[in-house]
Amino acid sequence: MLSRIDHIGIACFDLDKTVEFYRSTYGFEVFHTEVNEEQGVREAMLKINETSDGGASYLQLLEPTREDSTVAKWLAKNGEGVHHIAFGTEDVDADSSAIRDKGVRVLYDEPRVGSMGSRITFLHPKDCGGVLTELVTSAEKH
Ligand code: CMX
Ligand code: CO
């Protein structure tokens, strides 16, 4: 069951500058940073709130690490802004296969590694009204 907004992914050219904007403007602090080579991103997670299912909701600030990454390609076309939304679930395998059965393209055969050891997959934006949609099971849930 999709039970919360896990994060909103925001693409930027300069991660440090964007982190500073969110800190100085809103007071949001960095909870976690990492490089995900498979996804081609350097990212900062800013925890916004905890949720009633024991999870949390974040902003995920994303800077591309290489020219051929999906985020670099998206930035070149669109400039900075909201790149995707992510729903949290206790069971990304079950939820993604149920969604696939409804005719929505799920981009990965098996979930891959996301932020903080989570397991993630994506739904094609063209099947989701133009919204790239990620499903996330956080590390402590799997
Ligand atoms: N939101 C909405 N639409 C998007 C999109 C996005 N983020 N990215 C691409 N699209 C649209 C494009 O505008 C394009 O539409 P048009 O044909 O109407 O112009 C269409 O989808 C195809 O786009 P493309 O630029 O040719 O890009 P690709 O098909 O090569 O890749 C996608 C699109 C969704 C398959 C790819 O971005 C992907 O695999 N995404 C999942 C992985 C990812 O985004 N990783 C980074 C985040 C990591 C994390 O969250 O941890
Ligand atoms: Co994400």
Image: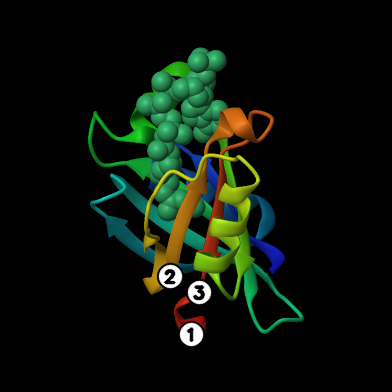
| Residue 35 showing in the rendered view | yes
Q: Residue furthest top?
A: 77
Q: Can you give x and y, in whole percent of width and height, for residue 20 in the image?
A: 50, 51
Secondary structure state at the residue bearing disc 3: loop
Residue bearing mark 3? 138
Other residues around mark 1 within 10 Å, as few (<14) / some (14–19) / many (≥20): few
Indicate left or right for 44 with 50 as reference.
left
Q: Earlier in the sequence, mark 3 or mark 2?
A: 2
Secondary structure state at the residue bearing disc 1: helix
Please name the amino acid that badge 2 sits on: Ser
Q: Are the residues flagged by discs 3 and 1 in contact, CB closer than 8 Å?
A: yes
As displayed, is residue 41 above or below residue 87? above
Q: Nearer the viewer, residue 40 or 1?
A: 1
Q: How is the image coloured?
A: rainbow
Q: Give the residue drawn at x 60%, y 49%.
A: 101
Question: Based on the displayed image, in which of its 4 quarters is residue 69 positioned?
Answer: top left
Q: How many marks?
A: 3
Residue bearing mark 2? 118
Question: Based on the displayed image, in which of its 4 quarters is residue 71 positioned?
Answer: top left
Indicate left or right for 41 with 11 as reference.
left
